[in-house]
Image (cartoon, rainbow, N blue to C red):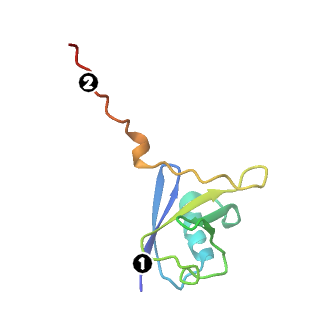
């Protein structure tokens, strides 16, 4: 049964078509061709639970469902992974300025 997941990083969202029986490694291989980053330098984190997805497990095993949001982080020069950085649409809008009347 085909499904898709949304993989987010900074201001970019990748819509990846996949199957629940695919492994996290399969998803990373799909991403590799899109972002030009090797799979060993990618980390996928299921939003909501904060669980790091394991390469050898299937999406179904890790309870990744259709339309799930997954954060993508990349390995930095110091060999650690960067923090999750996803820009939300609300970040683009400022709250309205209330007009103050003069009496």
Residue matched to label 1: 3
Q: Quadrant of residue 9?
A: bottom right
Q: Residue at x 26, y 24 (%)?
A: 99
Looking at the image, is 93 positioned above or below residue 81?
A: above
Dividing the image into 4 quarters, which one contains the N terminus?
bottom left
Residue matched to label 2: 99
Circle 2 residues within 10 Å: few <14, some 14–19, many ≥20: few
Residue 36 screen position, x and y as percent: 60, 58
Q: Nearer the viewer, residue 21 or 95?
A: 95
The residue lying furthest to the top in this view is 103
The residue lying furthest to the front in this view is 103
Q: Quadrant of residue 100?
A: top left
Looking at the image, is 43 positioned above or below residue 95?
A: below
Left or right of residue 38, residue 72 in this image? left
Q: Secondary structure at mark 2?
A: loop
Q: Nearer the viewer, residue 91 or 101?
A: 101
Circle 1 residues within 10 Å: few <14, some 14–19, many ≥20: few
The residue lying furthest to the right in this view is 78
Q: Secondary structure at mark 1?
A: strand
Residue 58 screen position, x and y as percent: 58, 82
> Residue 48, which numbered label?
none
Left or right of residue 12, residue 96 in this image? left
Q: Quadrant of residue 2?
A: bottom left
Dividing the image into 4 quarters, which one contains the C terminus?
top left
């Amino acid at each position: 049964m085909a499904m898709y997941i949304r993989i987010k990083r900074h201001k970019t969202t990748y819509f990846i078509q996949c199957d629940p029986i695919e492994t996290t490694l399969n998803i990373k291989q799909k991403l590799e061709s899109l972002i030009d980053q090797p799979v060993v330098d990618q980390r996928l984190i299921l939003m909501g639970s904060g669980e790091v997805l394991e390469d050898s497990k299937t999406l179904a095993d890790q309870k990744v469902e259709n339309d799930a949001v997954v954060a993508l982080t990349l390995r930095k020069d110091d060999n650690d992974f960067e923090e999750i950085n996803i820009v939300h649409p609300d970040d683009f809008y400022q709250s309205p300025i209330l007009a103050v009347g003069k009496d």
